[in-house]
């Protein structure tokens, strides 16, 4: 077990989450926005593992396992949607997808 | 001061600092790289750094899953989509289509980070019962403990995830399928209708 205090891990995952969130807001390529979502999920996973260590509770690691499963399902469906979008219009950015705009 | 600290403490800090630098550099790379393929490679770097941090917190199974599933499967899926669709054109990162979007996003990020920092400083993050769903450092390996927890306490959620994965597979097949080609009869019908409409417009 590492001797580095847990607050350092929590701070790191907070910074990672913020970078992912800002990237999601700033980037326009749909694939890159998706990767930023993965960054945020990883930050949350790191937080869960750190809490698991702080509370000496295996449940935190089990939750990370479930997060990974849901992330895999989310990536599969999301990439399917992206493939369908790109088949309709090539090189579409998030700004081009405004069909539902009123 | 460094000479007084035990060697394993220095080693722990070294591992943490190196892994943290790798993680943050990769994350910044994902956000700033122009080319989507470069973004995916930076994402792999971040995932490996997080896997190292998992190992340092004794979550060995999750570290292995992180490398195999995330870096090995999910990022490869990203790369497949990038290369199959030929969308590997560089994005104009400098161009700002929506005025004031970037400063607003960065401001929101700073506000969020300040809130997180306040939470970390408040020392109130991990409250509640200790080892509510089983201790993490009991006898046995990490894989054994995680397996016991997964197949006893969390059995129902585990079964539900299998349903979720089936739904995801079906959804991927349906979404990525090409629309069926029209049969020759339908094509002829469409042509006739088009001719009729044109004549209707003409008269």
Image (tube, coloured by chain):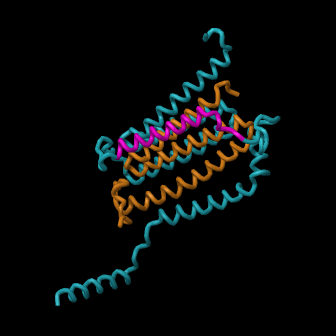
Q: Colour of chain A?
A: orange
Would you place residue A18 above or below residue A73 in this image? above
Residue B56, image x, y percentages: 65, 30
State which chain is coloured cyan: B
Q: Is residue B127 left or right of residue B97?
A: right
- Considering every residue shown, the one lying at the far left of the view is B203
For image coordinates 45% across by 38% down, the residue present is B110
| Left or right of residue B2: residue B176 | left
Q: Is residue A43 covered in magenta?
A: no
The residue at the point 73 percent across, 42 percent down is B128
Query: Which residue sits at x=60%, y=53%?
Result: A70
Q: Looking at the image, which is closer to me, B175 or A69?
A: A69
Q: Residue at x 44, y 48 (%)?
A: A33
Establish if B131 lies above or below B153: above
Examine the rendering and report whether any part of residue A57 can be seen. Answer: yes
The dominant secondary structure in magenta is helix
Q: In the image, A85: left or right of A39?
A: left
The N terminus of chain B sits in image quarter: top right
Residue furthest bottom as drawn: B203
Whether residue B115 is in magenta: the answer is yes
Q: Which residues are magenta?
A: B101-127
Q: Position of residue B84 (x, y in %)?
A: 42, 53
Judge by depth and name the residue closer to the eye, B142 or B3: B3
**Percent x, y of residue B60:** 68, 36
Locate residue B16 relative to residue B91 in the image: left or right: right
Which is more toward the observer, B159 or B116? B116
């Amino acid at each position: 077990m590492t001797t580095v205090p847990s607050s350092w891990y929590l701070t790191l995952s907070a910074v990672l989450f913020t970078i992912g969130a800002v990237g999601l807001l700033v980037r326009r390529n749909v694939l890159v926005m998706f990767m930023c979502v993965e960054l945020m999920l990883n930050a949350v996973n790191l937080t869960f593992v750190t809490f698991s260590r702080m509370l000496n509770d295996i449940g935190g690691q089990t939750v990370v396992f479930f997060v990974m499963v849901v992330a895999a399902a989310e990536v599969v469906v999301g990439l399917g949607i992206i493939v369908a979008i790109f088949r309709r219009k090539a090189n579409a950015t998030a700004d081009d997808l405004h069909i539902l705009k009123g | 001061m460094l000479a007084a600290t035990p060697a394993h403490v220095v080693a722990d800090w070294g591992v943490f600092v190196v892994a943290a630098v790798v993680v943050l550099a990769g994350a910044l790379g994902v956000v700033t790289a122009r080319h989507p393929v470069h973004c995916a490679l930076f994402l792999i770097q971040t995932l490996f750094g997080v896997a190292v941090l998992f190992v340092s917190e004794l979550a060995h199974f999750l570290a292995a899953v992180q490398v195999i599933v995330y870096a090995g499967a999910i990022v490869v899926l990203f790369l497949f989509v990038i290369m199959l669709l030929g969308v590997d054109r560089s994005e104009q990162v400098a161009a700002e289509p929506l005025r004031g979007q970037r400063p607003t996003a960065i401001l929101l990020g700073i506000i969020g980070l300040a809130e997180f920092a306040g939470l970390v400083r408040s020392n109130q993050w991990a409250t509640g019962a200790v080892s509510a769903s089983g201790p993490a450092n009991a006898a046995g390996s990490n894989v054994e403990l995680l397996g016991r927890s997964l197949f006893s306490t969390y059995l129902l959620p585990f079964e539900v995830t299998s349903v979720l994965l089936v739904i995801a597979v079906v959804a991927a097949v349906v979404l990525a399928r090409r629309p069926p080609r029209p049969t020759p009869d339908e094509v002829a019908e469409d042509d006739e209708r088009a001719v009729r409409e044109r004549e209707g417009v003409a008269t």
